[in-house]
Image (spheres, grey):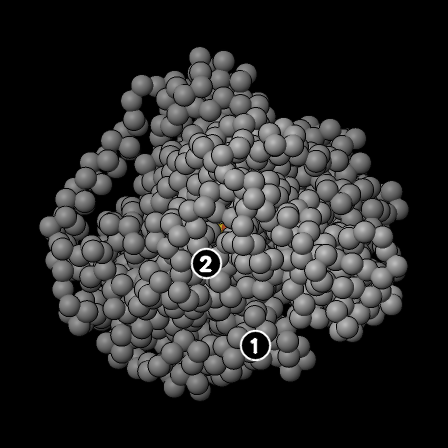
Amino acid sequence: MQSIAEKDLGTPARQSTKMVTLTIDDREVVVPEGTSVMRAAALAGVSVPKLCATDQLEAFGSCRLCLVQIDGMKGMPASCTTPVAEGMKVTTENKQLADVRRGVMELYISDHPLDCLTCPANGHCELQDMAGVVGLREVRYGYDGANHLTAEKDTSNPYFTFDPAKCIVCSRCVRACDEQQGTFALTIQGRGFDSKVSASQDNPFMDSECVSCGACVQACPTATLTENSLIEKGQAEHSVITTCAYCGVGCSFRAEMKGEEIVRMVPNKDGHANHGHSCVKGRFAIGYASHPDRIVKPMIRAKITDPWREVTWDEAISYAAGELKRIQAKYGRDSIGGITSSRCTNEETYLVQKLVRAGFGNNNVDTCARVCHSPTGYGLKNTIGESAGTQAFDSVMKSDVIMVIGANPTDGHPVFASQMKRRLRQGAHLIIADPRRIDLVRTPHIEADYHLALRPGTNVALINSLAHVVVTEGLVKEDYVRERCEWDSFEKWRSLVGDPKYSPEAMESVTGVPAEAVRGAARLYATAGNGAIYYGLGVTEHSQGSTMVMGIANLAMATGNLGREGVGVNPLRGQNNVQGSCDMGSFPHEFTGYRHVADDAVRHSFETHWGVTLRAEPGLRIPNMFEAALDGEFKGLYIEGEDIGQSDPNTQHVTAALSSMECIIVQDLFLNETAKFAHVFLPGSSFLEKDGTFINAERRCSRVRRVMKPKSGYADWEITQLLSNAMGFPMSYGHPSEIMDEIARLTPTFSGISFDLIDRLGSVQWPCNAQHPEGTPTMHVGTFVRGKGKFLLTEYVPTNEKVNAKYPLILTTGRILSQYNVGAQTRRTPNVQWHDEDRLEIHPTDAEDRGISEGDWCGIASRAGETVMRARVTDRVQPGVVYTTFHFPDSGANVITTENSDWATNCPEYKVTAVEVTRVNQPSEWQQRFRRFRSTQEALLKQADVFIK
Ligand code: SF4
Ligand code: SF4
Ligand code: SF4
Ligand code: FES
C-alpha cells in the first residue's frame, strides 16, 4: 500500500545516454531510451490508471487498466510494458479507453468486499482510487456469483495480516519478494479464477521461507497485505524521514505518525542506501522504544547491593559529577574514563569523547568498535590511507565477481544482501570464504562459484595462498601497481606470498580448503573484470585481524581492483553508526578523522577550539580499562549506549572489573547487563526521540530526525552536556546541528558537511570538503588517499588458541537476521518469534560422537569458562567447528570467548575459541550465578517507579 507523500511513476527508471522524444496527450516529453510509456506519461504530468505496476518493480502487464492508444499501433497496448519510441504519439484518455478501463474495474470490484469504510486501507487503497479514477458507478455482475470473499485470513506473521478476500492477484507481492528482496517465498498458485497468492507450498507466512522484510506489504495496492499496526491505529497524519538505528546499511525510512505515535515505518524510496527496501528489524522491530522495561527516570545508588532510588535529573547529574571528581581527587586524573557507542549519533559520540578529553582531562575514551572493526581502521589506513570502505553500495551493481569473506550479509546486512543478490542473478560471479555454509552459498537462483570453507583462524593463510596464485600465475595488474603503488613494497610482498610455503597446496593442510578451489577462486577474482571484496567480523575478530585486512587490501591493489565503481574493499560495518563512532574520534589515540593525539598541529586545533590543554599520549583502551580496574587504578566509568557486560569477551573478567569500580554511570534505555553493576542510571533516548546523524558502512552520513519528544525529558547529547557542565567543562549547544558544525570546523574530511547540506542532498558520503563539495561515493580514484598504495607484509602466524585433546572443537560466532547484537532492542519485540534463544550449531558427526541430538542441552567449556545451550545439529558447520549467536545474555556466549586479541588493535578473537561440548542436563555454574544475580538486580529495580507508562 502506498505511503503517504510518495509519488509512484509506475515503472522503474532507465539509464541511457540516448534520449527519446515523444508526445503524450499533446504534451512533448523527453526520456531515456527504454523508459515505459507509463513512466514517460507520469513525467509529463499525465497519470495513466494502473494497478499491477509500481516504479519499484519491473512491469508485468497483467491488470490491463493502463491501456493507451498509440498512433500507428493496433489495439490498446499496456502503457506499463510498452517502451517509448522516437516520435511516438500517445493518447491516454478517450471514451473507448474509458469504457475498457471501467469494464476491467467492474470485474475486479465484483469479487472484492465492499467494506471500504471499515477497511484499514480506506483512503490509501489503489483499487479504491482507480475505481474513482475510471468513474466506476455500478457493478452489473452482482456479488452473488463465485467469489473469494470468504477466503480465510493468515495472521501468523506478528507484523502483518494477509487477507486473501481482498486480493486482486496483481502479483506485485510476488514480484517484490523475487526482485526486491530475492527470497522467492511467494507464488501465484492455480490458474484463472482459482489463482491465488501462496507463501511457499501454501503455508502460513510464518511457516514459509518468508523473512518478513515487508516488501510485499509495501507493494500491495489493496488491503490484502497490511501492517498490523496500521490495522490497529488507522492511517497516519504526517511523516518524518529518518534513518534506521539497527545495522550498518543505514536504511532511510519515512516514520508515519499520528501525533506522537508511530503508525508504521515505510522504507524511503529516495533512500540512497536502500532505495525503498528494508528488513524485518528496521521496518517492524521498533516496539522496544515503548517496551515496559524501558526506564525513563534517573536513578542512583551507593552500592550495587542497594536498591535503586529515583532522583531528579539535577540530583543524578550532580551525584555523577561529584563521584567522578571525588575519584579523580583520590586516585588521580587517569582513574576515570568513558565509553561511547556505535548505536548513538555522531553528535553524541563526539560529545562523549570531548567530555573525556577536555572535561576528564585524559584520553581514556573508547568505543565498541574496539571489539568489531578496529582492525579495519588499522589495516586500511596503513595500506591505502583511509579507514573506511571504498565504495557506495550501488557500486556492487557494476561488479563482475564478488568475494564475501567472513560476512553473512543476508543476516547481518539484509538490504545490501538483496541488492547483491540482484547483481548475482544478473550473472556476477560469487566467491565465499567462510567456515560455515551461509545462505548466500546456495539460495534461489544463486550459487557460489566457490565456497572456501576454511578452518576458523586461518584467514591469513588463505589470503596469502590466493595472493600466491595471483603473483605466481602472472595475474598481477603490473601497470596499475607500478603507477599507483610503492613498487618496492609490492616486491617485498610478492616475494613473501610467492614463497612456495604459501602455495594453495602447501596451505591446504592449514586452511582445510582444497588447493584447486583456491586456485580457481584466485583466477576468477583476478580476471573476471571488476572484482569487489566485502568482508565482516569473520575477518577482523581474530588475533591477526589487522593482518587479514592488510592482506585483503594487498590483493585488491595487486589485481587493480580499487579506485573505480564495481571494485573495492568494503567492510560491512555491523552497527548503525560504527563507522561514525570511529570517525568521531572515539578511540583513545585519535581525534576526529583518525588523527593521532600526538600530532601537535591537530591537537592544538582542538585545544584552541575547546580552550583547554589536551594530552598528547593515548589513553586506555577498553581491555586496558578492565586491567587497570582490577589493579585498583581505574575507578570511574561513564558508558553511553553500550553493554560491555554482555558484548565484551570473557564475561567473568569484565564483571570482575566492573565490580571493582566505585562509580559506574550507565546511560541507556534498559537496565542492561552493564547497568546491573552501575551506581548511576541516566535514562537515554531512542533514535526516534532525537536529532543527529548516523554514518553507514559506505561512509554515508544521513539524518536522524526526532519524531517524538524524548521519553525521559532529554536527548542523549543533552545529558552529556549536563554532565560536562557539572564536571566544570562548559558546553552550551542548542541543537545537534551546532555540534556537527563544530565537527566540520575541526575535521578536514567533514568540513563540507552540515545538516543543511544533508537535508538538501538526502545524504552525503565523506570525504566532503572543498574538493568534494557533494561527497565522495568512490574513494581512491586516480590516486590513493595516502598517495601511493603500500603493500604490507602479512606473514601467517597461527593463533595461540589451539585445539587439543581437552578442547578439540573450534567455536565461532555470528548473527541472525531477526536479532541485533546484544539483543537489548530486538529481544523486546515480536522478533523473538523467529529466534528466542541462542543455539549451538554442531555437525552431525561431532554430535553423534558426543551422543548429542537436536535440542539437547550442551555444555560448552573453554579455557575461559563454561556455559550451556541447546544443540542444533546441522551440516552448515563443518566437522570440528561449532557455531553460535550471542543475542541472549544468559546464553553466556562471551563467558567462553577468551581475551586473546588482534595484535595491533586488541580487537577480541571472538571467532576462534577452542572448546569441548558435552551433553548435560542443567545450566552451567555461571548461568546459575548469573540468574541469581539478575533476579536480585531486578528486585532492586522494582522498588523504583521509573518505567515508561
Ligand atoms: S515479507 Fe518479504 S520475504 Fe516475506 S513474502 Fe513478503 S517480500 Fe517475501
Ligand atoms: S496480495 Fe496484494 S500485491 Fe499480492 S497479488 Fe494480492 S493484491 Fe496483488
Ligand atoms: S538492513 Fe539494516 S539498516 Fe536496513 S532496515 Fe534492516 S537493520 Fe535497518
Ligand atoms: S498497470 Fe499496466 S497492465 Fe497493470
What is the x, y in percent for residue 367?
43, 59
Query: Residue at 81% of width from left, 60% of height from top?
Result: 70
> Label 1's element?
helix
What is the x, y in percent for residue 549?
63, 51
Q: Is the residue under label 2 in contact with that under label 1 (CB below 8 Å)?
A: no
Quadrant location of the C terminus?
bottom left
Q: Which residue is mark 2?
A: 123
The disc at residue 730 is none
Based on the displayed image, in which of its 4 quarters is residue 319 positioned? Answer: bottom left
Based on the displayed image, in which of its 4 quarters is residue 886 positioned? Answer: top left
Of labels 1 and 2, earlier in sequence is: 2
What is the x, y in percent for residue 431?
71, 40
> Label 2's element?
loop
Q: From the viewer's perspective, tell me whether residue 647 is left or right of residue 335.
A: right
> Disc 1 residue type?
Arg
> Disc 2 residue type?
Gly
Identify which residue, 371 or 84, lies in the foreground. 84
Based on the displayed image, in which of its 4 quarters is residue 639 positioned? Answer: bottom left
- 842 to 211, vertically: above or below: above
Pair 1/2: label in front: 2
Count of marks placed on residues: 2
| Residue 209 visible to the viewer | no
CA gap, disc 1 and disc 2:
30 Å
Bin the neighbour count of mark 1 within 10 Å (Cα to Cα): few under 14, some 14-19, many 20 and up: few
Query: Residue at 71% of width from left, 71% of height from top?
Result: 44
Query: Residue at 84% of width from left, 47% of height from top?
Result: 527
Query: Residue at 63% of width from left, 73% of height from top?
Result: 775
Identify which residue, 866 or 137, lies in the foreground. 137
The disc at residue 760 is 1
| Residue 736 visible to the viewer | yes
